[in-house]
Amino acid sequence: MKNTLDHTIKLIILIQLVLYFYLFIHYDIIHFNYISLISSLLYFPFAIIILKYKIDRKTIYFGLTAAVLIRILFINNFPLGSDDIYRYIWDGKVQYNGINPYLYPPNASQLNHLTSTIIPGKVNFPEMKTIYFPLSQWLFYLGYSISGEEVWGLKLLMLLFEMITVTGTLFLLKIREMSAGYVLLYALCPLILIHIGIDAHLDGYGFTFFILFLLFYLKPADKNAIRKIISLIFLGFALSVKPAFLIALPAIFLYESDIKRKIIFPLIPVFILAIQFIPYLSTPDLFQALLKFARNWTFNGSIFNVINVFLEHNQKSRLICLILYAISFTAYYFFMKRRKIEFDLYYTYLLLLLFSPVVHPWYIGWLIVLLPVVPRLSGIFYAALSSITIITVINYQLYGLWQEYPLLIFIEYIPVIIFLTGELIFYNGGKIYYKN
């Protein structure tokens, strides 16, 4: 039986390799869509087998090798599912030329001398200044320094970060005495392969810092708490890529027993995040674009979309969702028994996604990076079903029509909400997907 399951896992991995090689040969938006959907469907049996049965070491090595090969395969391909990377390259080019990346939007006349055949013509929202934090800007600068306007510099950097993420996850699994095979839940997750490996969204850098935060935080700390301080610095770096895991600060406050640590430790990541802005504080309207994005943009929201159908008012719907999330966040910590910090981060972030007005698939990646140490069907279904949102992107690229489909959002979210509810109510049940 065990040999049969190992062969099944290897077969699925081999099929994935063939699918992505086929995409490499037929690299267009239509095939990108098909491969994304088929690959995501294969993730269901793949994940269930990994969670229910312990796979052998050779299969794990084969899976990790395949994960690296797929990423290398597309290292010189510009993304199809998103044009964000053009903004990354542009921001890197601007700073490489000694100009503050927060000072001008891409279409500003002051930057005309930096114009090329690629950028800023392909940069999205060229009338808006950048929304990305300083640490991301420095990574963009590094990527541009390596390869200029070629995409492989940023993708090579991403590959190195991804390898650190996987290595850190393996150490985390060892600390928690869990199966090393669980690492494949992240390394071969189609959402990660598509949106981090191929499209190179900067969230991949954040995943690395977040895993390093957990790794150092969960290691036995010495008397001077050096490891925990290092972990909180890494959390600050993760927040510098995407600030969503500010929700980790209350968890740190609750998990620390010493009153001084309760106060000081949550401030360390905030300090790391804040000091990065010091060189740019003189920039007029530094956060203008970020605030505009936060106030107005919507995509793939679940509870937000339901509320907005009735209110038809973006700002009021956002405010209600924020209040509801604050209530659910507080209720979670009030009613749920303290367990392990990674579980609390998983569930509070999943709740945040459910109430958020903007849920791009790569945002879900912050949940998937926790799947190896928090193996839950809610995350597995979310990771797989979110691939159907690519239909909106394809219609926009082919026909210039940006339209969301309520039925697809329903299909995506209902299983996630059902499993989430079951997991919170029957926490000790469902051993099929939590086998140490």
Image (cartoon, helix red, strand yellow):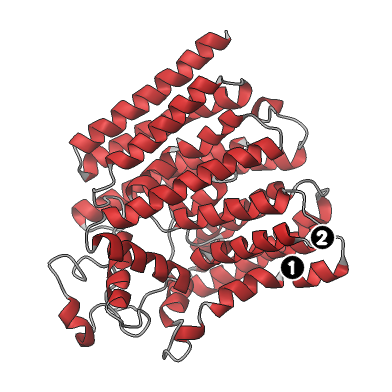
Q: Mark 1 belongs to which amino acid?
A: Phe
SS of the residue under disc 2: loop
Horizontal and vertical percent position of residue 88: 33, 65
Task: Give the side of residue 314 with respect to residue 401, left or right.
Answer: right
State the image quarter where residue 110 is shown.
bottom left
- Number of other residues with Cα within 10 Å of mark 1, as a class: few under 14, some 14 to 19, many 20 or more: some
Q: Quadrant of the N terminus?
A: top right
Do tag 1 and tag 2 residues touch (Cβ < 8 Å)?
Answer: yes
Q: Nearer the viewer, residue 360 or 279?
A: 279
Residue 131 appears in the figure: yes
Horizontal and vertical percent position of residue 287: 46, 81
Q: Mark 2 belongs to which amino acid?
A: Glu
Relative to 81, residue 147 above or below: below
Residue at the image position 49 percent from the left and 41 percent from the top: 383
Residue at the image position 58 percent from the left and 32 percent from the top: 182
Q: Quadrant of the C terminus?
A: top right
Label 2, on which residue?
Answer: 256
Label 1, on which residue?
Answer: 265
Hey, which residue is sitting farthest right in the picture? 258
